[in-house]
Image: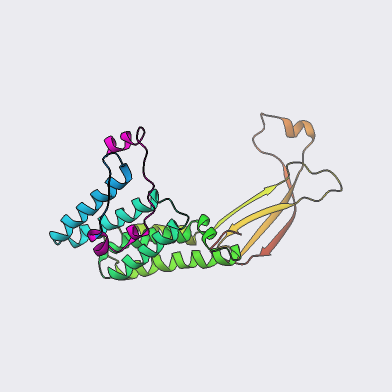
Amino acid sequence: LNGLFNISQYYTQEPITNKQLFAPVQEFMQMPIEAKDFDVNSNVIKLYQSLLRTEFSAKRTDAVLISDLDRLEYINRVFKTEDNTSLYLQALEQLIQQQGNNPYIVEALYKLAQFYYRPSYSYLRPDAPNTQNKQNYAEALDICNKGIRQFPKYFRIDILKQLARQITQTNVSYTIEPNVYPGQTQDIKLTFKNLSNISITLYKVDETTLEYLDVNKKTTKLEKVSTHTFRLPKQLYPQ
């Protein structure tokens, strides 16, 4: 394969645009694929076809599933149309439906959950971003939990468990203006996820300017001014 990719630097490559390449494995194995001698992507796809045929003939069901998943991922990467991502997701969902009782389908569930969880996925659905992100994150978590319940003893089930923890973990960050002059207000920009409330405590530096600038001191003298607690809408997506 390295030799093929080196060749691609010197020969014009045909764009991959045939949507049928995302077809289910049975159809993919039978379809004619034209691959010119120095056309890298088409030759790689043809290699996947040959590999799948060999594994299917040997009745290696698990190997067929994993190779088919790799095939779909590769085609998604080299496909040159605007709807490649939606075609890839449809193919993943169809594969999961067809192979739903095979423990190795956890690998496909993981890839599908990743797509729903990543923030950039929202561009595929142009309606209200916050609402859609909420649905996507919830769907990703649901995919993880279903896989964990169905195949708890799968040897790589931790990939779903780790992603579920990542989706549900609490996160908070803030930004403030470094300098605020007397009479001005201090704006705090808060970004949070999966958090129902937050407390903010304000302190005043109780030191003279010389004391504050002393590099040899161990701690800064602070005087508590006030504490404010705010209730937040607890959601899986960042707000």
**Foreground residue, 50 or 181?**
50
Q: Nearer the viewer, residue 196 or 18?
A: 18
Q: Is residue 114 magenta?
A: no
Where residue 93 sits: x, y (%)?
A: 37, 66
Q: To which quarter of the image does residue 213 belong? A: top right
* Horizontal and vertical percent position of residue 120: 52, 55
Q: Is residue 207 above or below residue 110?
A: above
From the top left corner, tell me how far across and down residue 196 is, in percent. Answer: 60, 65
Q: Give the farthest residue toward the right.
A: 183
> Residue 178 placed where, x, y %?
73, 42
Give the quadrant of residue 126.
Answer: bottom right
Q: Residue at x 77, y 30 (%)?
A: 210
> Toward the viewer: 34 or 23?
34
Tell me where the magenta segment starts and ends, as one range: 1-30
Q: Residue at x 26, y 40 (%)?
A: 37
Name the residue located 44 percent from the left edge and 64 percent from the top edge: 140
Which part of the image, by quadrant, shows the C terminus? bottom right
Q: Tag count in the figure?
A: 0
Membership of 8 in magenta stretch = yes
Give the quadrant of the N terminus. Answer: top left
